[in-house]
Image (tube, rainbow, N blue to C red):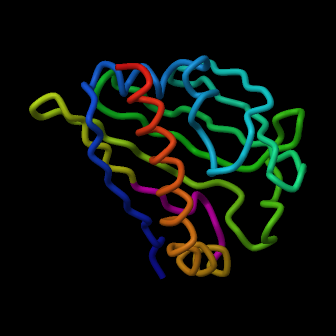
Amino acid sequence: MSNPVFEISRTLDAPLKLVWEVYSQEKHLAKWWGPKGFEWVSGKLDFRSGGSFHYCMRAPTGQEMWGRFDYLEIEPLKRMVYTTGFSNPAGEIVRAPFAANFPLRVLNEIRFSESAGKTTLDMTGTPFEAPEGEREFFRSMFPSMNQGFAGTFQQLTDYLKSLT
């Protein structure tokens, strides 16, 4: 069976240069990245091909959750390709705290485009080197992932408004 592909797209009322900046600088990511209701704890960003983003967020329950992006390709103002995974404080990839059969890593691509001063983000995500059971579980998570990204994109929208 082929890998399931999660797709989501958003158009933001902000110029491409600004949207790229808030995706590529830690000081901005700290203000909007993550699930709605989560608090930024810490992060370290090395935004370049071969670099990484390691961060910690605190859930409303008080639980700390760590994550890591590993950037594979970055084409400034056009696209970024990276894997994501949950991690421990040392940055080692670990199982998702909510489900043992969620893929360890997900391969993501975001394409950025601008028209009439608005920026469109087209994102895909697919399990990376995952066995069949994890791929199927990933597919079953699409409704939850849509809801989660809707909250994150709303935080991004609100943050962009605060900058303009």
Residue at 63% in and 51% down: 35
Q: Position of residue 70 (x, y in %)?
A: 61, 35
Task: Tell me which corner region of the image, top left, top right, bottom left or bottom right, holds residue 12.
Answer: top left
Q: Nearer the viewer, residue 125 or 129?
A: 125
Q: Is residue 135 above or below residue 68?
A: below
Residue 111 placement: quadrant: top left
**77 or 153: nearer the eye?**
153
Magenta segment includes 123 = no
Q: Name, please, the residue furthest toward the left.
A: 116
Residue in the image at 61% along x and 60% along y: 129
Quarter of the picture holding the C terminus = top left
Q: Position of 132 compared to 8: left or right?
A: right
Question: Relative to 74, is 88 above or below?
Answer: below
Q: Is residue 149 above or below residue 140?
A: above
Query: Looking at the image, which residue is at 41% across and 20% down?
Result: 163
Identity of the residue drawn at 78% across and 26% down? 42
Quarter of the image where one finds residue 128: bottom right
**Total numbered badges shown on the rendered structure:** 0
Placement of 71 over or under 104, stated as above or below = above
Stretch of the chain drawn in magenta: 124-131
Residue 13: % across, % down: 26, 36
Q: Is residue 4 left or right of residue 38?
A: left
Give residue 65's position: percent from left, percent from top.
81, 47
- Magenta-colored stretch includes residue 127: yes
- Indicate the position of residue 113 as horizontal and vertical percent values: 21, 36
